[in-house]
Amino acid sequence: MDWQIILDILPSVLLEGLLLGLVYAMIALGYSMVYGVLGLINFAHSEVFMIGAVAGAEVMIGCVHAGPAAALVLALLAGALVSGMLAVLIERVAYRPLRRRASKVRLVPLITAIGVSFFLQDAARLYLGLVHDDFYRVYPNFELLERTMDLPLQATIQGKGIVLMGVAALMLGVLWFLVVRTPMGRAIRAVAQDREAASLMGIDPDRVITRTFFLGGCLGGVAGVLFGLLYTQINPYSGFFPGIKAFTAAVLGGIGSIPGAALGGLFLGVLEIMGGTYLPLVSDGNIGTEYKDIFAFAVLIAILLFKPSGLLGRGHVEKV
């Protein structure tokens, strides 16, 4: 094992892990926001992410002659709006009726979320098959976005990597401002803390929940476009593994915690890329890169065993 090679490629590995971690963080925020308000794990969020990626690909391909800047901005807007509206539709059709029936069986909304997830996968397959006679969409390559820039410590970054970091930082900053500094954010936090008390104070919980789903969906859609831009090719199942790993990141950071979801996503992205890169090196090729996917699930098991509340989560205190 050549330790010099490991050290030489470390900056590039960390940078790639940071980019993937930012995508995971944006998806994980959707899980955490919905859980914080409803106590629901919305497993359909991974398909909301995928639909946003498909919408972004369609717009970017259709606007390819407008240039990279215009095509990218329109694709991001399309991914955010389509995924945001889809998340609202899912809440209205699938979750709100269950909430109004006040079912005490917590498995019912969970099973509903899984059913919605499968439905959206098949709907995307049907759309791509009928419209394009193919199950894959490939993001167009723009020379400006593919151009590389040299960084210190022998690391390089492509233009699309810079775009991903900038857009992700902007979205995370806007979300923090909305949640912490605006009346809408205060309403979201109030409903998350005590829905009944918030309604008595004049806050409409249904409206707050709808806005929460919309914000989470927008983040997922933008993450889908950035994921497609980074890895080029998407399909109806592209949301499954990123969604599972983003859920793991949300649990790692503390489900329901917005800073925790961001921290968990970054940590998991770096861990996954380091595992995929270094496992073949330290094992002399006996363990391949494909084993990187086990890291997310190993981390999830470790969290549930040793710190179920997550890195920044708080233990549940029942009020009497």
Image (cartoon, rainbow, N blue to C red):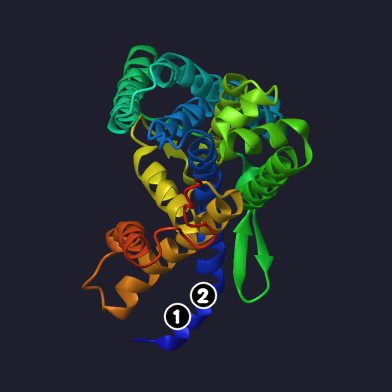
Determine whether, in the image, residue 153 is placed left or right of residue 296.
Answer: right
Give me the residue at 32% from left, 25% from top: 112
Q: Determine the image quadrant of residue 39.
A: top left
Say what secondary structure mark 1 lies in.
helix
Please identify the residue farthest to the left as the structure is shown: 286
Q: Which of 2 and 184 is in front in this view?
A: 184
What residue is at 42 percent from the left and 21 percent from the top?
Answer: 99
Q: Would you name the residue on which mark 2 appears?
A: 10
Q: What residue type is labelled 2?
A: Leu
Q: Quadrant of residue 198?
A: top right
Kindly identify the residue that appears in the image at 56 percent across and 26 percent down: 209
Q: Do the residues labelled 2 and 1 touch (CB within 8 Å)?
A: yes
Query: Mark 1 — residue?
Result: 6
Residue 240 position (above or below residue 3)? above
Q: Circle 2 sits in a helix, a strand or a loop, which is it? A: helix
Amino acid under disc 1: Ile
* Crowd class of label 2 (few under 14; some 14 to 19; many from 20; radius 10 Å): some
Q: Percent from the top left, x then y, of residue 107?
A: 28, 32
Q: Residue 13 placed where, x, y %?
A: 50, 67
Q: How many labels does the image show?
A: 2
Q: Can residue 65 be seen in this view?
A: no
Does 271 appear above or below 129? below
- Please tell me which residue lies in front, 145 or 40: 40
The x and y percentages for residue 282 are: 32, 80
Q: Residues within 10 Å of mark 1 (few under 14, many from 20)?
A: some
Q: In this view of the protein, which residue sits in the foreground, 147 or 3?
A: 3
